[in-house]
Amino acid sequence: MVRCSTSPHLEYRVTDKAIHCGHFHKADSHKAVAFEFKNLAPQSYSDNIHFSGKPEVMSEWIEHTHGKGTLEWLDIEKNKVSKLDKYEMDKISKHYLGLLNDELKKRGIRNPWK
């Protein structure tokens, strides 16, 4: 189960299409932090699409979850040049797949996406 970062009263199964991976700094505008874990949060479809991600609420969640100063750090990182070619995308994909598999193994959960 996963709780929405911007509407914490909403909880979803991780495989539910109604839960998204919301970005604080939008991925299309800030490619340098598009895959930065600290820029991402579980977010309901409604909050992500219809309420522009509720940035004020998400900013509080980010600071609470990742620590004071995270937003300031993201503001600096978002403007860095990032080259998302096939090599970089594969590298990022393998990194996060490894983290997912480690977490599933640690929790004794079978991968629901296999």
Image: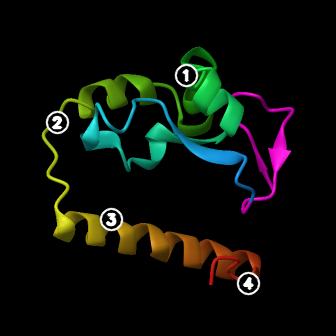
- Residue at numbered disc 4: 110
Binning the other alpha carbons within 10 Å of mark 1 as few (below 14), some (14 to 19) or many (20 upward) gives few
Q: Magenta region's main secondary structure?
A: loop
- Residue at numbered disc 3: 92
Label 4 or label 1, whichever lies nearer to me, is: 1
- Disc 4 marks a residue whose amino acid type is Arg
- Residue at numbered disc 1: 52
Residue 80, numbered label: 2
Q: Nearer the viewer, residue 58 or 47?
A: 47
Mark earlier in primary sequence (4, 1): 1
Mark earlier in primary sequence (3, 4): 3
Residue 32 location (% of width, % of height): 25, 42
Binning the other alpha carbons within 10 Å of mark 4 as few (below 14), some (14 to 19) or many (20 upward) gives few
Q: Nearer the viewer, residue 60 or 7?
A: 7
> In the rendered image of this protein, does residue 113 appear above or below residue 9?
below
- Residues at discs 3 and 1 in contact (Cβ within 8 Å): no
Q: Residue at x 51, y 26 (%)?
A: 68
Snapshot quadrant of residue 78: top left
Instruction: Judge left or right: residue 103 versus residue 73.
Output: right
